[in-house]
Image: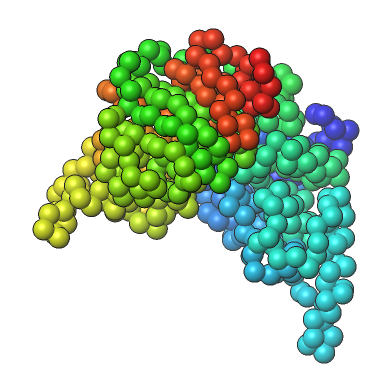
Amino acid sequence: MSTAFAAAESTAALEAVGISKHFDGVFALDDARFSVRPGEIHALLGENGAGKSTLVKVLTGVHAPDGGRIMRAGEPIELANVRVANRAGIVALYQELSIIPSISVAENILLGERLPSRGGIVQWSALRRRAKEQLDRLNQRIPLRQLAGELSPVQQTMVSFARALANDARILILDEPTASLTDTEITELFAVLRSLRDDGVAIVYVSHRLEEVFELCDRLTIMRNGETVLTKDVADSTIDEVISTMVGRSPGDLFPERGTATSEVALRVSGLSGRRVQDVSFTAHRGEVLGIGGLAGSGRSELLRILAGAQKHKTGTIAVGDTQLPHSAGVAKTLDAGIALVPEERRSQGVILSASIQDNVALANIGAVSSLGMVNGGRIADITRRGMSDLQVKARSPHQPVGELSGGNQQKVVLAKMLARNPAVLLMDEPTRGIDVGTKAEIYRLIRRLAAQGTTVIAVSSELPELIGMSDRVLIMHEGHIAGEARSEDATEELLLAHCYGKTV
């Protein structure tokens, strides 16, 4: 272990032994085992659908296990619900933080606690003092009176941590905590997590970003098909070993062969400018995978939104093939012209979580599934089944709500509804964000298959190895401009990173 506290502590803070759980006769967990020690950051890894989320829900009282036992500090414990788990010091912080944006930072921190009052009147000075004590433990200086909705993502994360500490949490379970953070904010978060570890807090770290795991964590556990297949010290493992164990194949097999680009121009962009994008010009060819990189705020996502008609632009032209689009044509006309966007925020922008897979696909393809104002149920069922089959969506049926699916399968539903339109140009913003290595490989194969069929794919990614591996050509943006371009076979991470910072190479 990396800390003296953890090395000296032999009893697990929280342990799951032989846990089983099934839904509709299908096992989500089968004899799963996991333990985290006090003063340890322990990574819980696996593909989407491997059982991580179900195990976390068992450990936090959301689901009751069908078999096995849970131990808290060496003693058996029955976690009947989330409140019982919280009283036992077990708190989960999810990717979608439970911050109430319309109340103050101090009120968020003490949410659910008995507020200091006298004669039925809240003692605000005492409340803010107690909230400040928790922020001081995290070395944070966040204005206590400020509305939580006005905070940055990392500040909201810190407020969630402070709330957990106010509830005397000794076991923190973090689900993709860095998904919406910048590199600087991630560094700040890691410093806080190390401080909590040194205080003896046990931290379970669920992430698909393996570089973070190897930088931060002490031990790792890998799950596959509902079972625990490996637990070991991070120092004794490698990223290649982790990938191979998770997906059952070499990491070198992640990216398919390239070489489907033709000389035919599918998209021509000239002098495009928006709020952040400045005088961008480029062409993309039929069958080409064009990667776009750059630091957060470089204009890369805004560029895709403008191309998709989701954001107006000030100057410039966009042409699909030989057809120039009207200025700021809007989403509907842009879709009809053959440009479709898979957005970065799939949960808030890509799907309706409460609706079924079939309804999500139908809503994006009303013209194809209706005639004379009447929706054809058979057509809806047909294109949904075809999309689920082509993309290998794992679901009970087309009628399952999208919100019940794993992150990778939600992404596949977004793709399915857009691919049903047979776009000439498919825009993808962070296509593998928040999904596991195995599903990433499926997405890469799909992108290559689409390119081989003649679709032009333009994909934004924050991960330089991904840009190089999946693309034929890479454009890098810096402060709204295209700062550099490279063929993927000639690109290196060092070269692309230099362009990201606007350096001339």
Q: Quadrant of the C terminus?
A: top right
Viewer-proximal residue, 278 or 107? 278
Furthest-top residue in view? Answer: 490
Across and down, in percent, residue 468 comes to: 52, 19
Q: Is 373 on the left or on the right of 472, as rendered?
A: left
Across and down, in percent, residue 173 comes to: 67, 46
Residue for point 32% across, 26% down: 266
Residue for point 51% across, 21% down: 474
Q: As displayed, is residue 101 above or below residue 378?
A: below
Q: Quadrant of the N terminus?
A: top right
Across and down, in percent, residue 484 comes to: 57, 21
Q: Is 64 on the left or on the right of 147, as rendered?
A: left
Residue for point 68% across, 31% down: 212
Residue for point 78% across, 68% down: 145
Viewer-proximal residue, 454 or 284? 284
Q: Is 380 on the left or on the right of 423, as rendered?
A: left
Viewer-proximal residue, 247 or 303? 303
